[in-house]
Structures are given as structure tokens and as C-alpha cells.
Image: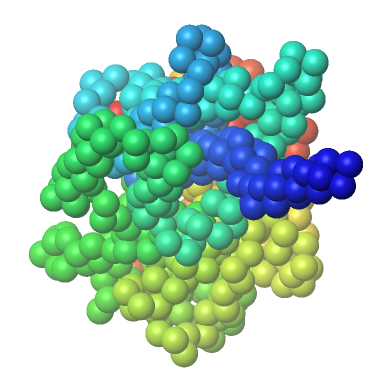
Amino acid sequence: MDNGTTTGTTTTDEPESRRQDGMPRRIAATISPYFIVFSASACGLIIEIVASRILAPTVGVSLFTWTSIIGVVLAGISIGNYIGGIVADRFPSRRTLGLILLGAALTSLSVLPLLALVSGLYDALHIVPRILLITSTLFLAPSVILGMVTPVVIKLRLRSLEQTGNVVGKIYAVSTAGSIFGVFITGFVLIQWIGTRPILLGVAVFLLLMAIAFGSLWRMRTVGAAALALFAGIASIGIAGDSLESECQVESNYFCIKVREREIDGRTVRTLTLDQLIHSYVDLEDPAFFVYGYEKIFADIATMVGHSKPRFSALFIGGGGYTMPRYLEHAYPQSRLEVIEIDPAVTQVAHEYLGMPRGTSIITHNRDARLKIPELQPAGYDIVIGDAFNDVSVPYHLTTLEFNEQVKRLLTDDGIYVVNVVDKFSSGGFLRAVVTTLQASFPHVYLFTDGNDFEADTQFTFVVAGALQPLAYADIYFASHAAERGDPDLVMMPQDELQAWLAAKPNTLLTDDYVPVDNLLIPVYLDSR
């Protein structure tokens, strides 16, 4: 009996010891499925957020861009879930998981070498199908493969059909948490910290390490060696083709910012490109040099204001290259100039590369205009200049009736609000909507060009002005000659023609509740290449 007791004690002690020794392994085995799906889902959403910044220099950031990205990534995940379920039933092994993670690593890494090829592949297409095809070519494959991870992990994790609901629910909850984490860490930290290309490279390396650690890839020597060679080959192609090097001088939360030098009219100027659009041409030695016609119109109207009020106050919505603020600071040193520029990196670039001195009298507010304007002094500005719109990205919340009312509140009794608008005169709808919406706030609204005859239906940058007192071309003409600027560059559309143009088609009043800017700009998008 004593022997039996001793034997029993010995028998129970040994399994307990083994259980203690195997505890870390069992904990790791329990946690690893959740870590894998969390990480794979995070990588998928990191790629989705990075996609917008990768595509911005090529096709801009618009409703169409985001629609394509979200649609393609969701389609990829959906297809991946379906295929992953089939694969999980036929090949339920860790090696299968390893090959899937390896495929995700390779396709994620291949985005950058493919970008240069793909961006020129669909040039013959209109902008909307072009965006969709570029997005699909670059991001569908990694989305599909990452979508396969969750079904395979669920299959490997299931031990009993009685726990199916519990296991599936937990894994999908963790997967969704990973997606949320991927969105937040990318948008709030990674892009401004290391930039988009290093992010994609990091995702690819991380997925490769996961394939090795969790997918038994290290046991498949031939496959593993081939995979590492292929990974190194793709990375080498990217390095040789400079695709891992960002073309951006600065990559901010808002833009890919580039400054380059060009020869224009026999002079060397610097260009400021935000994403794929040149926003400003800057002559460091001559603040009065303008390339864009709408800038000349802004200058004509500001000259009229400065003629009667040399100490005028001006507010700029959008800084860009600070071309107009620098000009007015030079021409009217007694004026008070303020700029609302949402991106502090743009302001920093203006100081470092575009000739704006650190000791400038120009006051800059790095805020969203919709948030900053309510904080500014009522009736404190003689002119407000809106320069935040372009042909591929329009901050719609700055186009509405409610925003116009906020701007009107800032103006003096004879104040003027001028804004540039890119559209097609006849077939476009955005210009009509801007004019109609301004008419709801201002008693006098005018439409200007720099020589257009208001008949051609091509993409053009117009200037619209809302004024609290009537404007006369004669006043602009006289002020321009008094300032020794010669004849004004602007052409003012007669008011009767303006009303007839508006009456020819239905017009949209833009409000915070209804502001279909991207739809109104479809003729411009369809005309873009």
C-alpha cells in the first residue's frame, strides 16, 4: 500500500512538472492565433490608408480615389475570405498559413516597383476608370491574400464544433480590433513619422517574419530559400528603380510636397507641387511675378482695395507657396496679412525653399479654415481670398452657404470675398453652384477670368467674388494704373450675362447638409488624364 501511495505520488508529480514546463508553450499556442489575425488585419488597413498617399501624386485625392481604394480593399478581403475558407478545408496546416503570409509579404512589397509601371499604363483612360484600375492592379492582390488569413486561422484553432461560435466570434473581434489599430497607427503616427514607402516595406518584412515564425516556413527549406530570394529580388528591383525612395521632399499628413526649379519666361522659378498638382510658381527675387491667371486677378482686386486703404487687412484661406501674401507684403507693407494654412509642413516649406523670411509680418494659422474662422475678429478684414480649391481635390466644407456666412461675418462694410474655382464653363456644375451659393449670402456677386471669352467649354480656373458693395471695372482699372501695374488682367462678366448663364440650367445651393462637390466636378474629372 505504501508502494502504491508512493507510486501514485510519483505519477501525479511528473505530469504536473511537465505541465508547468509546457505552460509558456500552451499560452503561446493560445495567443498566437489572435496575434496572427490581429496583425494581418492591421497590415491590411495600413495598406489601405497608405494607398491614398501612394496614389495622391498620380491621381490626386478625391471622392473617386477613396471610393476606389475602399471598394477594392473590401472586395479583396471578401474574395480572400471566400478563397481562404476553401483552402482551409482542403489544406488545414500551418504551412498553408505560412505560404499565405509569404504571399501577402511579396505582394505588399511589389506595390512600389509596380507603381511607376502602372501609373503610366492606363493614361489613355478617363480619370475614374484609371483610378479604379490603378488601385486594383496595386492593392487587390495583397488584400485578397490577407483576407485568406482569418479563415485558415479559424480552421486551425477549432478543436470542437461545440466551440465554433465562440472561436469564430473571438477571432473576428480581434481581427476587427487589428483593423482599427492599423487605421489609427497609420493615420496618426506612421505616415508623418516615417513616410509611406518605408511603411510598405515594413509591412512586407513584418509579414515575412510572421510567415517564418507562425507558418513553419523555416521547415520548408526549398520554399523558404526561394521565398527569401524572391523577396530580396523584389526589394532589389525597388531599390535599383528608386521606387523605395519617396519623390516627396516632405511627406505630411496632408500632402506629398515637392519643390523643383524651372525656367519660365527666361527666369528661374521654384514650383511647389502638392501631390500631383503644381500649386505655385515662385520667383525668389520678384514677389510680383505671377504665372497663374487667377493670381493676377487676385492681385488686381487686392490692388483696388489697397488703393483706397493702404493699411487694409487681408485673410487668405490656403497658403500654398504664399505667392499672393508675399506680393501684398511687398507692395503694401502697412497691410495686415493673415493666412490659414491647414498643413504646417507647407508653411515650413515656404520658409525653407520659397523665399518667405522667418521674420515675415505675415501671420499664419495652421488650422482648418472652418475651425479657425469662427475665432477671428468680426468685421476685421477688407478682403478674404480663398485659394484652397483645385481640379482634383476640393475641401467641400469650405464651399457651403454656412461657410460663406462665416466669411461674410469677418468682412468690413465694403469687404470682398474672392475665391478661385476650377470647372468647365458650360458643362460643369461646380462653378454654377459656387456662384449660386455666394448669391445667397452676398448682395453682389461677380465672375472673372483673365481673358476667357466665357464661351469655350474647357477646364479653366475662374474667380468668383462676393461683395458687400458694388464693384466697378473702372475702379479696378484706375487702381491698377495708379499702382503702375498697367491694364488689369481680369475680365468681368456683365451681370445680365451672368444671370442668363445661371438661368440656362438648374443650379445647386451648397449647404452643410447637401454638398455634392465631386459629382458636380464629374465633367472635369472625365476630361482629366
Q: Residue at x 38, y 28 (%)?
A: 99
Q: In which image quadrant can residue 501 be found? A: top right
Q: In this view, does 334 lie above or below 77?
A: below
The foreground one among 121 and 51 is: 51
Q: Which x, y percent locates residue 250?
A: 38, 64
Residue 202 x %, y %: 40, 51
Which one is nearer the viewer's eye here, 235 or 22?
22
Question: Taking 269 as reference, is 1 above or below it?
Answer: above
Q: Farthest residue toward the right?
A: 1
Identify the residue at the far bottom of this view.
Answer: 359
Say whether residue 65 is visible: yes
Point out the image quarter for the N terminus.
top right
Q: In which quarter of the image is residue 247?
A: bottom left
Coloration of the structure image: rainbow
- Quarter of the image with the C terminus is top left
With respect to residue 156, does 304 lie above or below?
below
Q: Position of residue 51 (x, y in %)?
A: 44, 39
Left/right placement of residue 449 relative to residue 245 reads right
Q: Which residue is drawn at 56% across and 38% down?
A: 36
Percent x, y of residue 417: 62, 55
Quick one: 200 or 405, which is closer to the camera? 200
Nearer to us in this view, 145 or 466 = 145
